[in-house]
Image (tube, rainbow, N blue to C red):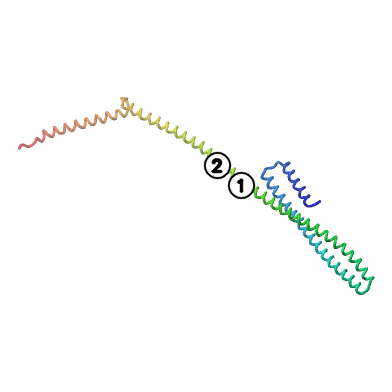
Amino acid sequence: MSIKRRITRIVQANRNAAVEAKQDPRVQAQNAQVSQYSLLDQARRGAADVAAHHHRVGLAANEAAAYLNRVEAAASAAVRRGDDDAARAAIRESMTARRRLETLTRQLREAEEQSRRLQQDVRRLEQRVQQNAMEYDAMLARRAAAQAAIGVHDALASSSREAAAIDAARRNAELEVRRFEAQAQAREELSWTDPSSLRLQQAFEELEAEVATQQELEDLKRRNARRYPPAGP
């Protein structure tokens, strides 16, 4: 099974598990991110393995090409020497070396193409993981902003309710103060009309004391006038 198919199956399995789990959306998103990073690491290792295989095949192909050149050179040298047996043996060896080089060259092209495709897949997967991470961070930021907005609205609503309660209490207190003031004023007015009220008695006592004081002053003046008559001219 190819690496791409294994990654696809793992992604599908993770999606099915997320649907069945019915977890908190944040937990699902976080788990999906962890899975994607794991898949990305696996894809990178697979691409690295294919790149290493491509390198090994390339080295083998270079060695096969060098060996073919040596065998062909040996065949040409044998022909120049007139050694037909050595030339035929070198030619047969060169044919085997050429088939091996062709096989390695084909494998090298296939490994190169596979490595190229995997590198592209890894880059796409990296971009997808980065995009999902940014979307996840943006989702968390939006969630935090929404929660903050809810808190602000709740605070405003509570403040409005408290302000209404305070205003109602203030109005009630003001009404009570006015009632007390009216009662005090009414009782003050009644105190002047009630003969038995202490205030009216005090007022009469003060008036009587003022009258008595004035009378005493007049008597003192008359006594002094008889005792000390004014002197003549």
Residue at x 77%, y 51% (from the top left corner):
4
Residue at x 79%, y 62% (from the top left corner):
55
Examine the rendered structure and indicate whether residue 145 appears above or below residue 176: below
Question: In terms of image quadrants, where is residue 190?
Answer: top left
Residue at x 23%, y 31% (from the top left corner):
210
Closest to the observer: 34 or 217?
A: 34
Amino acid at the residue labelled 2: Val
Which disc number belongs to residue 141?
1
Closest to the observer: 123 or 34?
A: 123
Closest to the observer: 30 or 109?
A: 109
Question: In terms of image quadrants, where is residue 178?
Answer: top left
Element class at badge 2: helix
Amino acid at the residue labelled 1: Ala
Q: Quadrant of the C terminus?
A: top left
Q: Position of residue 191 (x, y in %)?
A: 33, 27
Residue at x 25%, y 30% (from the top left corner):
207
Which disc number belongs to residue 229?
none
In the image, farthest residue toward the left: 233
Examine the rendered structure and indicate whether residue 203 appears above or below residue 70: above
Are the residues at dot 2 and dot 1 in contact (C-beta closer than 8 Å)?
A: no
Q: Residues within 10 Å of mark 1 (few under 14, many from 20)?
A: few
> Left or right: 174 with respect to 76?
left
In the image, farthest residue toward the bottom: 81
In the image, farthest residue toward the right: 85
> Left or right: 37 with respect to 181?
right
What residue is disc 2 on? 152
Element class at badge 1: helix
Examine the rendered structure and indicate whether residue 105 appears above or below residue 6: below
Q: In terms of sequence position, does the residue under pointer 2 or pointer 1 come before the other?
A: 1
